[in-house]
Amino acid sequence: MRADIYDKYISTRFGYIHKTDQIEREYKIYYRYFKKNYLKHLPKDKDARILDVGCGLGHFLYFLESEGYKNYLGIDISGECVSFCKNRGFNVALYDAKAFFKQSNDSFDVIVMNDILEHLEKKEGIRLLTLARERLNENGKLILKVPNASNPIVGLSCRYADLSHEIAFTETSLRQMLRLCGYTNILIYPSDIYILKNPLLNIFGKLGSGLLNLIFRTLFVLYGKRDIKIFTKNLLCVAIK
């Protein structure tokens, strides 16, 4: 069943949340998001070897190419997604991520997993992260993004918005899983989604979000959850080998 879900992922999921006929417009919007949140974590060397696990419709690949990173590879388990990306000239291959790490001898400076871990059961996630660490060069980075289960507004919705979602993460459980996989240098950041072209709207968005985060933080502290401090829609994690 899982293979069927992913193989037809555009037909059954992505096609309903992304306008595939207007993908260039989406690429430009996501480019601003990735530039704001990810660029500072990428190597300055444009020849760095980068792997995008679960490349989907190619949003992150578009960002990499736009920033001059050409030495990349995108992999995805969905035949539809791989065909979609190939038709746009991206360097992609059809692979299950765990099988790729086991079969390939390639090593990478950066491995990116955007919205991947929530699709895997705990044991699968631990195995994938462990395999990824083995494929990182020394001082290489794992960069991953997951929905934030600590956000009372979108956390539960994100968990059950997709039939293939298996788990949800807070900053504490995400850090715990990475430690189990041998990562020690783990940094978790809030993600900034306010990348609109109108700077005034970005300011209002950040003010409103900041107020909500303060309310959420206060409520969590009152319930004894002092270790939860990030309440943005997504969590962005950088783990260094």
Image (cartoon, rainbow, N blue to C red):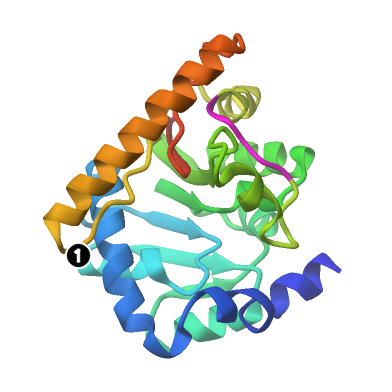
- The reply to whether the magenta stretch includes residue 170 is yes
Left or right position of 189 against 8: left
Left or right position of 125 against 55: right
Residue at 75 percent across and 49 percent down: it is 166
Q: Nearer the viewer, residue 16 or 222?
A: 222
The image position of residue 222, as x and y in percent, is 55, 10
**Among the 4 quarters of the image, the one containing residue 6:** bottom right
Graded by Cα atoms within 10 Å as few (under 14), some (14 to 19) or many (20 or more), the crowding at tag 1 reads few
Q: Nearer the viewer, residue 217 or 146?
A: 217
Residue at 50 percent across and 66 percent down: it is 55
The image position of residue 185, as x and y in percent, is 43, 21
Dominant SS in magenta: loop
Residue behind mark 1: 68
Disc 1 residue type (three-letter): Gly
Q: Which residues are magenta?
A: 167-171
Q: Is residue 177 above or below residue 30?
A: above
Left or right position of 120 against 207: right
Q: Is residue 222 above or below residue 112?
A: above
Q: Nearer the viewer, residue 148 or 38?
A: 148
Give the structural element (helix, strand or loop) at label 1.
loop
The image position of residue 114, as x and y in percent, is 49, 53
The image position of residue 233, as x and y in percent, is 47, 44
Residue at 59 percent across and 68 percent down: it is 76
Residue at 57 percent across and 81 percent down: it is 15
- The reply to whether the magenta stretch includes residue 237 is no
Q: How many marks?
A: 1
**Among the 4 quarters of the image, the one containing residue 223:** top right
